[in-house]
Amino acid sequence: MHGRTIKLTIAALGGQGGGVLTDWLIAIAEANDYLVQSTSVPGVAQRTGATIYYLELYPRAQAASHGREPVMALMPVAGDVDCVVAAELAEAGRAIARGLVSPSRTTLIASTHRAYTIGEKSALGRGSADPQQLLELARSQGKRSILFDMQRTAERNRSVISAVLLGAISGAGVLPFAKPSFIEAITRSGLAVEANLAAFEDAHAQAGSGGAQAEDARTAALRPLPERAHTPALQPLLDRLRRLPAAQLLVLEGVRRTLDYQDAGYAHSYLARIERIAALETQRSPSEAGVLIEAVARSLALWMTFEDTIRVADLKTRAARFARVRQEMGADRGQLHAITEFLRPGVAEIAGTLPASLGSWLLSSPRIVRWLDRFTGGRQVRTTTVSGFLLLRALAGLRRWRRGTWRFRQENERIESWLADIERYARSHYSLAVEVARSQRLIKGYGETCQRGWRNFSLLSQQLEFLAARPDGAQRLARLQEAALADEEGTALAHELAALAAGQAA
């Protein structure tokens, strides 16, 4: 490799220090008497794309012996890259899709963590790429693959991922430069030297050993339940969970989620509902048993932790969120920064936070709703100010009274109706009951998003009696769910419902 141009591509998201990493590599190459050329193509902000940095390196002595400097390319070419560095797992997949990772030539260095795209976050249904498939793809496509969670490595060393990437490049030995050259580049840059060197050393060791492969879904599913709960008060929850016939790890995550959302009593309510479904599994064959519990456990945990104003305020004022935003901004600990939250609570959200009787009265009065609607435009709250932070913390503090709110009563009634449908059909049409459980995925978010999802969910629920009489009822309901998630306008769902109505008429 050293007698020809070395070609390296870096795919990094905004705030991950791809430019800093490139500057370090340029400094290292020049210090080792290499000619180096770098180009970059910026992506779009807010994680809809990554910036691609491309470097070509050539020994200066080799160029002198030939009597001329090499002509270097401005962009990578498929099948002609020695090393691809991806600061996030999906970006590794993008590089592979573009043909930049060659099985006969390319070393792939990639972080196994995910930073979700806007498309993934805003999808009506589950829009995220399957991380297991991405991992298997990354492991199989390169001549050599070095994969580990570089974001976690950076956090462990209170550093940034660019320093981890540099350590991985050094540890992988893809460049003909000694380790001290890399260390010197970090030191001379003067950027958080101590933390960056610690992250560099950590990543260098991991890459040198081939990278710690991420735990895949099959291995994770075999993990045992913890022996003891974190506190004695929570041990009854764990003991109760152990008696379930299936999906114990999935239910455990649901217990943790409901604990975080409300309290231990709420987690016990979650388990009580799961036990109702578990009682229906006793008559199922071994091949079927557990499918319904899994579907209900996932959907019920999401529904019971619905996003009300209290939840939104709580999440936006957590210390972990402030730390994450600071890291994404690249702000040092002593550096001033500001966070502005854009909020748009509607009348329904305001009523949902009120005591049930008051909220119901408010929404039953069109005149009051119209009057309040005039004051529900967008609001900007700076949570890095004392007043903004205390405002949202006060709202989050209403959590202790959440059970008495109108929104909680409404969602609780909806959940019980949904569970009753599942119990009704589980005895005679098990596969349909499973799809009823999965249909909760139509309901997500808050405000107009939640209202639209509930409207679609209700339309599907109205078809259950007809679908239960059909042998293909479960397949039809699954198709209706996909149609509901296809577009916000409801065009695809309307088409499917029309076809179903035509079938009923026939």
Image (cartoon, rainbow, N blue to C red):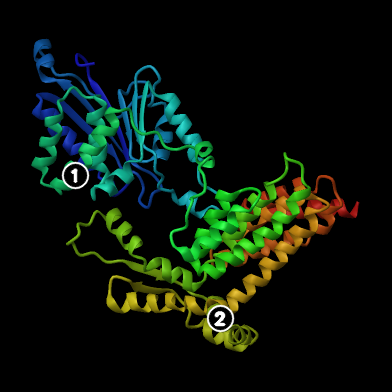
User: Which residue is tagged 1?
Assistant: 196
Q: Amino acid at mark 1?
A: Asn
User: Which residue is tagged 2?
Assistant: 351
Q: Residue at x 75, y 50 (%)?
A: 282
Asked if 299 appears above or below 177 in the picture, the reply is below
Horizontal and vertical percent position of residue 12 = 31, 41
Picture quadrant where residue 255 is located: bottom right
Q: Quadrant of the N terminus?
A: top left
Picture quadrant where residue 51 is located: top left
Horizontal and vertical percent position of residue 331 = 22, 57
Horizontal and vertical percent position of residue 475 = 75, 45
Horizontal and vertical percent position of residue 239 = 56, 57
On the question of residue 18 being in view, the answer is: no
Q: Amino acid at mark 2?
A: Ala
Q: Describe residue 341's horizontal placement relative to residue 267 as left or right.
A: left
Asked if 418 appears above or below 46 in the picture, the reply is below
